[in-house]
Amino acid sequence: MKNIAWRRAALMSTCLVALSAPSLAQDQVNLIFRQFDPPTETAGLQSAIDAWNANNADIQVRMETMAGGDTLAQLAREVPAGAGPDIQHMAFVWTRDLAKSNLLLELGPLIEADAPGSGIDDFLALELATLDGKIYGMPWSADTFAMAYRPDLLEAAGVTHPDTWEELTSAAQALSNSDGQFGLCFPAGSSPDSGMWTLVNYYLWSNGSTLIDETSPGVWEITATAADIAAAMTYFNNFFASGTAPESLITVNSWGDPELIGGLGRGDCAITFFPPQTFRAAQGQSEMPLLTGMIPAGSEKRISHLGGRALGINPNTKHPKEAWAFVRYLLSPETFKTYNQYPAQKSVLDVLDFPENEQGYVDMLPQAQTFERYISSPIAVSSMTGLINREFGAVFSGQRSPEEASQLVLDELQTLLTRGKS
Amino acid sequence: MSVLPTSAPAEEPAHVWGKKLEPYLLVLPAMLILAFFFAGPAIYNIALAFQELSLFDLGREGRWVGFDNFAEVLTDPSTGQSLINTTVWLTVVTVVLRLVLGLGLALLLNATVFSRWKLGWLVRSLILVPWVTPPVVAVAAWKWLLDARYGVVNQFLVGIGAIEQGIPFLARTSTVWGAIETMLIWRELPFVVITILAALQSIPSELREAARIDGANEFQIQTRIVLPLLKPVLAVITLLTTIWTFNNFVYVWLATRGGPGDYTQVLATQMYTTSFVDYRMGAGAAVGVVMSLIMFAFALIYFFVIFREK
């Protein structure tokens, strides 16, 4: 008799569990967060997401990783088809392009209902996430570039941190030797996503030039001259011509390439330029200490770009409120305890303790400017990037002279501008 | 005299109709799958080629621009260079080399010595290693092998004193095409070897024996008996590898992204760049249509050769 009662109780509890399980599952919201940092740099982010999942049983988040170069096109295909991740990690420069085509949820109402951090004005580069006065992305992490170098190699060569572009040339000369040590390393590849684009703009901007500018409201013109672009081409090509940069870099596109990260650690390269997370990866592979310093100054000023990542919500998501709750968490100082990036919020950034060897970033951040001048123009930034990298590569490989290549750049920019306006 | 039932003529047409429809019904699923996965996207691509449409507006209809995209693509000087690169450096050179090397290797592998020593299975397995390697892995491995400072190829060449310092094969215009072609041929050669080997093994040994009895030497047997019998297979291999290589995107993109500069830009990478860097889906689709038309010409030759043989 007792046995039958026990069996009935067991049966009833099994039925209760079976009946309640679907409703529990229905109550739980599952979100997908897609990001494109390389897997080697996502451990801290995964820890932050694990902490969220542990504390939010009703909103579970799964992280997807996709190569940065494929992410934008993938989003452009998925979202119009009603698919895509709930929350998307984006480069600052993508936000407006996606927003223009309604591929991002407008965040205004969510911000109004539950503002993130210390308020919306606390965020850096918010203008890049804004279209027609509406916000479509939340600036999440910010970074800039600094010069990264091996102080021991500079000391051995009797060279101090080069302060100008001219000094960089002399330093690279002094630091190069026949034992396979090169003074300067940089990604000189011709790919549309090559890092060459960054250096070219630092050089042009610091010398008072820019590829395209809004000369008066709504009027965009190509402001760089053929001489400006040819000078930049000649300047960087001289590193290869003089043997102070290895010719093999003409095929390297990424700042995170092992030739650069490992090269600094091995002492093949004495000086390069890195964003913060790449510098940390290089330091991790180097037995010798590395330092950062300011980007060289040009004739007009010293400048770098303020880059970074933003977070957007898919307009197709069935759970915008829950997605916003997770975005707010990612923006919080708690996430940045494990996520190895600089936050794009002034208040959080101000109280951040920068390691001593990252002083170069502290010095460059106030002088960093966003790519706003290009993003607002009628030309797609990716087209400009592809054009510049291709023509600089053509000069480095001897296909064209700087004069020929610079004229080609101007002609093609003009075509792109005309097409963009129409 | 017997009288046929009046209902018989009415039943027969239905039966005949059923018989007539049966083959169509049997191929219908395959046709539907083909229409959905092949014809649909192909028609969409053709329609796209007549529109101005941004990558970000894929869900909508673009602005119809007639033949503007084709005019732009065909008058762009870079298209001419891409076409030469695609046709000559990527396709003709590698197809010819694959045929020559493939034929040589197949003849070698068909030698009786391998079967006598029971090594046939081993060499056939080894020859397939590149073919089973994913192209992405193959290109990545070759890039490391060809690295100027740490690559095995350069270290070997420096070691034997052939060169003083490593050559950045993918960075120089004088060597970059050779490097890409090496990667492609290494990965794709096994298909040619295995196909020719299969054809060689289907040639009856009696033909060779008869030729020997008639006094033919080994060279004459190969040129007068074997090669003519291989002709249909070689024709099919040539056309198939030509079509596959002409359309290929992977080797150039992974090895050089079309660089240095635009030195190795081919039609497939130009199509990708136009669509996904310049975000101009219509112009990118036009490049694709031009490529398809050229491939269609190849396909016509292919079918001509096949049906002529039959």
Image (cartoon, coloured by chain):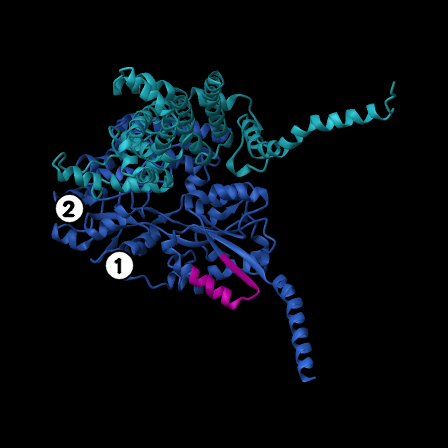
* Amino acid on which the number 2 mark rests in the picture: Leu
Colour given to chain A in the rendered image: blue
Residue A114 location (% of width, % of height): 56, 61
Q: Is residue A218 in view from this perspective?
A: yes
* Amino acid on which the number 1 mark rests in the picture: Asn
Label 1 belongs to which residue? A357
Label 2 belongs to which residue? A175
Subunit bearing disc 2: A
Q: Residue at x 70, y 84 (%)?
A: A1
Residue B19 location (% of width, % of height): 70, 27
The answer for how far apart the CA atoms under marks 1 and 2 are is: 21 Å
Nearest to the observer: residue B292 or residue A57: B292
Nearest to the observer: residue A385 or residue B183: B183
Verify whether residue A140 appears in magenta: no
Q: Residue at x 58, y 49 (%)?
A: A315
Q: Which residues are magenta?
A: A46-62
Letter of the chain in cyan: B
Label 1 vs 2, first from the N-terminus: 2
Residue B167 location (% of width, % of height): 20, 36
Q: Is residue A213 left or right of residue A249?
A: right
Q: Is residue B21 left or right of residue A144?
A: right
Q: Mark 2 falls on what kind of element?
A: helix
Q: Is residue A201 in view from this perspective?
A: no
Q: Mark 1 falls on what kind of element?
A: helix
Residue sitting farthest toward the bottom: A2
Nearest to the observer: residue B221 or residue B94: B221
Verify whether residue A59 appears in magenta: yes
Question: Measured along the vertical axis of the image, is residue A7 above or below residue B149?
Answer: below
